Amino acid sequence: METKHVAMLMVLIPTAVFAQTHDENHSTSPSAYAGEETRLIKSLSEQDLEEIARGGGWGLARAAELNGVPGPTHLLELAEEIALTEQQRDNIEAIRAQMQADAITAGERFVAAERALDEAFQQGAPNAEALERLVAEAGKARAALRLVHLNAHLLTLPLLTDAQVSQYSVLRGYSDDPCASVPDGHDPEMWRSHNGCN
């Protein structure tokens, strides 16, 4: 009788240990999204909504900004350090004002599209046709908003000298100061002149 009990325990103990280990390894932990279910629009934070509402960049122009094509807002912030002329400032300010106005309008359309998509899921799962339409509308609205910001960078670039663009990249932390050292094979005077070095 005792032998049967011992044999039964030998079978059950490893099973119980496995089950406990399995539960510990696969226990439910809070999602990275926890807390976001209270958002007005689930895909957008309050900070996102505020920045979009004021026509802020929202990181949409990184393809230009990080590839050496400056944007109007940061250029105006660095106007003294980059030595923008009065004419340059006026032209860049006009681009910035138009960009902001267009971004506010495009941002309203994007937020409305995201709200419609969010509401469709609040009311239950949308059908495949409705989902495709809602996602396409949100995608087009986001693309239009992104285009506004990227286009402002493109319009700004021709107004700047190479030296100003280079200095902008240094000041924004994207590149080393070209005036700090002259690369081998370059005439020092020409290099400093081309890069706006004093």
Image: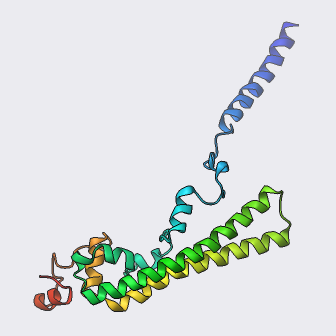
- Asked if residue 193 lies left or right of residue 174, the reply is left
Q: Position of residue 42 (x, y in %)?
A: 66, 56
Q: Residue at x 80, y 13 (%)?
A: 6
- As drawn, the residue found furthest toward the right would be 1
- Structure colour scheme: rainbow
Q: Is residue 104 visible?
A: yes
- As drawn, the residue found furthest toward the top would be 2
Examine the rendered structure and indicate whether residue 73 appears above or below residue 42: below
Examine the rendered structure and indicate whether residue 11 appears above or below residue 37: above
Q: Position of residue 16 (x, y in %)?
A: 75, 25
Q: Residue at x 64, y 68 (%)?
A: 111
Quarter residue 188 falls in:
bottom left
Q: Quadrant of the C terminus?
A: bottom left
Quarter residue 142 falls in:
bottom right
Q: Residue at x 54, y 67 (%)?
A: 53
Q: Is residue 185 visible?
A: no
Q: How many marks?
A: 0
Give 87 or 57, whichever is nearer the viewer. Answer: 87
- Asked if residue 9 lies left or right of residue 181, the reply is right
Q: Residue at x 35, y 74 (%)?
A: 74
Examine the rendered structure and indicate whether residue 22 appears above or below residue 147: above
- Asked if residue 183 lies left or right of residue 165, the reply is left
- Asked if residue 16 lies left or right of residue 1, the reply is left
Quarter residue 7 falls in:
top right
Give 182 or 101, whichever is nearer the viewer. Answer: 101
Q: Position of residue 168 (x, y in %)?
A: 29, 77
Q: Quadrant of the N terminus?
A: top right
Q: Position of residue 158 (x, y in %)?
A: 36, 92
